């Protein structure tokens, strides 16, 4: 799985997002990279703590 991470403070947020948006990959893959993978990884932990996302 791939999760988006930025070099906050070192590079502009927009330029880093542009790399994902400009990549020659499916829109569904972009959604996974920009948040869905992280949500899937954290969801079991958050549910154990009573946090629903």
Image: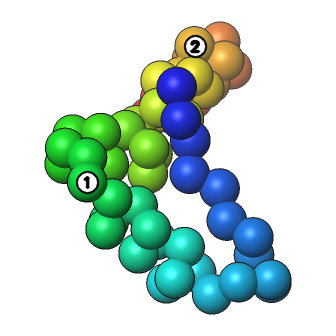
Q: Nearer the viewer, residue 42 or 53?
A: 42
Mark 2 surroundings: few (<14), some (14-19) or many (≥20) residues within 10 A: few
The residue lying at 32 percent from left, 48 percent from top is 30
Residue occupying the far right of the picture: 9
Q: CA distance from mark 2 to mark 1?
A: 31 Å
Q: Is residue 43 visible?
A: yes
Give the percent coordinates (x, y) of residue 21: 32, 66
- The image quadrant that residue 16 belongs to is bottom right
Q: In terms of image quadrants, where is residue 29?
A: top left
| Residue 44 numbered mark, or none | 2
SS for callout 1: loop
Q: Which of the pair 31/50 is nearer the observer?
A: 31
User: Is 30 displayed left or right of 48 in the figure?
Assistant: left
Q: Nearer the viewer, mark 2 or mark 1?
A: 1
Q: Residue at x 56, y 51 (%)?
A: 4
Name the residue located 67 percent from the left edge and 65 percent from the top edge: 6
Q: Is residue 48 left or right of residue 52?
A: right
Compared with 35, 40 (above or below) is above
Q: Which residue is mark 1?
A: 24
């Amino acid at each position: 799985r791939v999760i988006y991470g930025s070099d906050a403070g070192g590079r502009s947020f927009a330029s880093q997002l542009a790399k994902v948006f400009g990549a020659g990959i499916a829109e569904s893959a972009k959604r996974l990279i920009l948040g869905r993978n992280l949500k899937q990884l954290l969801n079991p932990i958050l549910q154990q703590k009573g946090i629903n996302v």
